[in-house]
Amino acid sequence: MKYKVTQQINCFLYLFCCLLVVAQPANAVDAALVEPDPTSLEVPQELPLIDPFANFSARFSAFRYGRELGYATLALSKMEDNQYRLDYSSSVSIFFLSDKRKETSLFTLQDQTIVPQSYVFIRTGTGSDKHVRVEFNHQKNKIVVNDRPSFPLELQLDNQLYRLDLQAKLAKGETEFSYEVINYRGELKHYQLSVVATENLSLPYGELEAIKVGFVRENSTRQTYAWFSPALNFQLVRLQQFKDGDEQGDIQLSQYETSGE
């Protein structure tokens, strides 16, 4: 019984601290679980996007069965010389387990296209600490993970940046998305996502209309959904995951500020 409880807690820590569930391999969820509902899927041909790369800061609360268990923060800032920085941090504690994580992505823009430069992941808490650094070397066309050349550089994004691209594509009315991603372990993964509905949400932040996106995977009972709000520059506002019909975690937006500066 103790092992089962610990395993369930670890699953929640895993979902919460990997905010976008990008650490899940692409063959984890049955694609049929995210087929669009034609009665609720109403995505306009093109939606107003203020600026997909505007400065913002967001805070999320994590719930399981309605109980709040931790928080996460996410912030994008524009620096000098066309440089951008995306920072994520989280902290959660459940019984005797704790987990703190930080991720930092540096990138530039070329014709409004994200060009990744570096990515850092740091994890501390119960169990082994972990540190991963990824360099996108555009001169030598290779990706270096922890000072070891690992992959040829093509069109990959890191564990965070594909979400910014997804927000811009949602604003254009796109409903199917495919990405090659270097995840927080420094591994190359393929992610397939699909719009499944538009829904009205009641969140700690307030009432929002949001576009529901499902992670398309195969041969698993895990279901993962993310909601993005057009009213908040297509920011992620909710993330929820189930396995075998049992909720593993529900992460909801509680604070959000943005600036066009």
Image (tube, rainbow, N blue to C red):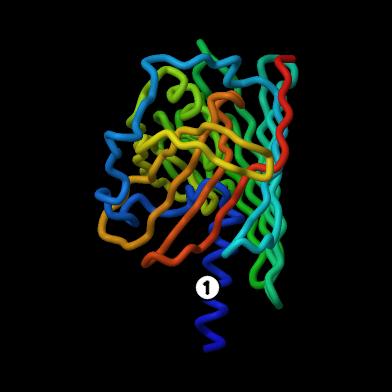
Dot 1: what SS?
A: helix
Q: Residue at x 41, y 39 (%)?
A: 213
Whether residue 240 is situated above or below residue 57 in the rendered picture: below
Q: Which quadrant, please, contains the C terminus?
A: top right
Number of disc labels? 1
Q: Residue at x 44, y 40 (%)?
A: 181
Q: Nearer the viewer, residue 99 or 253?
A: 253
Whether residue 102 is situated above or below residue 140 in the rendered picture: below
Which residue occupies the extreme bottom position in the image?
1
Q: Nearer the viewer, residue 10 or 212?
A: 212
Q: Position of residue 170 (x, y in %)?
A: 44, 25
Asked whether, in this view, residue 176 is left or right of residue 233, the answer is left
Amino acid under disc 1: Gln
Q: Badge 1, how many Cα within 10 Å: few under 14, some, many 20+?
A: few
Asked whether, in this view, residue 60 is left or right of residue 139, the answer is right
Asked whether, in this view, residue 208 is left or right of residue 126, the answer is left
Q: Position of residue 240 (x, y in %)?
A: 50, 52
Asked whether, in this view, residue 235 is left or right of residue 177, the answer is right
Q: Nearer the viewer, residue 40 or 73?
A: 40
Residue at numbered disc 1: 8
Whether residue 153 is situated above or below residue 50 in the rendered picture: below
Q: Residue at x 39, y 19 (%)?
A: 44
Q: Position of residue 150 (x, y in %)?
A: 45, 45
Which residue occupies the extreme top position in the image?
111
Q: Position of residue 37 (x, y in %)?
A: 29, 39
Q: Nearer the viewer, residue 176 or 244?
A: 244
Q: Residue at x 49, y 50 (%)?
A: 21
Q: Is residue 178 visible?
A: no
Q: Is residue 111 visible?
A: yes
